Image (cartoon, rainbow, N blue to C red):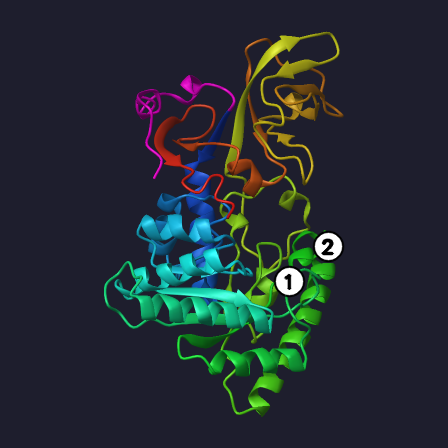
Amino acid sequence: MTSLTPALAELIGKPVHDIDTPALVIDIDAMKRNLGRMAEFAKKHHILWRPHAKLHKSVLLAKMQIKAGAVGVCVQKTAEAEIMVAGGIHNVYISNQVIAPAKLARVAALTQAVAAHRGQIAIAVDSLEGVTRLAQAMTTARTTGTRLGGSVATVIDVFVEIDVGQERCGVKPGQDVVTLALEIRKHPELRFAGLQAYQGTAQHLRSAQERRQAIARAVKSVGIARQLIEVQGMKPGLVTGAGTGSLVMEAASGVYGEVQAGSFLFMDADYAQNERDPAQPQFEPALFVKTQVISTHPTHAVCDAGHKSHAIDSGLPKVLAFDEKSGLDYFNGGDEHGILRPSAGSTRLPSLGKMLWLIPGHCDPTVNLHNVMIGVKGGLRTGVVHAIYPVDARGALT
C-alpha cells in the first residue's frame, strides 16, 4: 500500500486552504451521503451491490463500501485484484476477460489466498479457450502446491459474459452461452456462477427514456440466455451488471440480482449531464481537483490544473460555482494550465491566487493520475482535511 509523505500526513487537521494545488480532493460529507443513498437503495430493492473499485482504486474506500453493505468489489485488472486482496478485501470479481497464462496463474493464486479467509474470487469468460486456460491455471496451482493461503481446496466462480448491447466483450445471448456454461461445469475447479451483463453504452445516454429502452433490450437478451440455460437443466445463477447511469432499471427488472455501479460515489461532469431518472437516488459531486489562479488577463484567467491533473476523454472539467456571479467555463490550456472565462450571465473573472474547484469530466481515469486523494470534512470553502486516501491501484494495468 502507498505510504504517506510527512507533508501529506501533516495536512490532517489543516484548513482546506492549505492544500497545495493541483490536488485531488474528496468532499467526505458528499461522498458519505452518496454512499448512504446507494446502500439504502440496494436494501430497499433487495439487490446485491458490488461497486467497481476501478473508480477509486483505494483499499480504504473499498472497505468503507463493504462496511456500508457492499458484498465485495469489482475490478477490471488482475493487478487491481491483487492490490485489493493484499489490502484485506477477500471478495473480488474480475469482471473482464483474462487470457494470458501468466495472469491466470496470478488469478489462481488469488483464489487460494482468499479461500484461507473464506473469501471468493470470481472472473468473467466469453470463449471456450478462456475457460480451458482458466481451468489449466487452476489445476496447475492445485497440483504444484502453489498457494498463498495454505492447503485449501479452491474453486473460482465463473460468469459467462454476454453482449447486451455494448458490442465489446461477451457472446451473443444464444447457444454460445449454453456451450460455455456446460464447459465450465466440466472442470471441478470452476463453478458456473451466472451471467455478466453490463450495458456500458447505456450509462451516458442523456435521457432517462433512452436509458430505459436500452436496458429493456438488455433485460430481454438476459432472459433469452437464462431460458436456454434452464432448458439444459441448469440453474442460470446470478445476473450481475449495471452502472450508475442505469442501476434503477436493472434493479427493477426482476432479472438482475447484483449491480456494479461505482461512479455514484464521486460522480463527475459527464454523469451530471444525464437526465436523472425519478427513481434514482440523488447522487452529488464529491470528487474535485483543487486549483489556483496563477495568471490574470482582461478576457481570461489561467489556473494550474491542466490535463495532467484530470482526464479529458469524457470532456473538459466543470468549474464549481458557489454563486450565480462566479460562473466560469474551463477551456483547454494544455498539460499544466487551464483557461478560464466567465460563463454566460457571469460578469467577473477570479483574482490572482484564487482557489477554485474543478469537477472532472471522468472520475475513474482522473483518479489514476494521482497518488492520493485528500479527504475534506466541513465543505470545500471552510472545511478541514480529515483523511488521506492513497490511490493503491494507481497504474495497476496488468
Tell how many labels: 2
Magenta segment main secondary structure = loop
State the residue position of label 2: 207
Other residues around mark 1 within 10 Å, as few (<14) / some (14–19) / many (≥20) = some
Residue 46 seen in this snapshot: no
Residue 354: x %, y % from top left: 55, 14
Residue 102: x %, y % from top left: 46, 56
Give the foreground label among 1 and 2. Answer: 1
- Residue type, label 2: Ser
Q: CA distance from mark 1 to mark 2?
A: 25 Å
Residue 336 is inside the magenta segment? no
* On-image quarter of the N terminus: top left
- Using residue 196 as the reference point, say whether residue 169 is left or right of it: right
Residue sitting nearer the eye, 215 or 82: 82
Residue 210: x %, y % from top left: 74, 60
Instruction: Using the image, tell me which numbered label, if any, was put on residue 154.
Output: none
For label 1, the SS is loop
* Sequence order check, earlier mark of 1 and 2: 1
- Residue type, label 1: Cys
- Using residue 282 as the reference point, say whether residue 105 is left or right of it: left
Residue 291: x %, y % from top left: 55, 21
State the residue position of label 1: 169
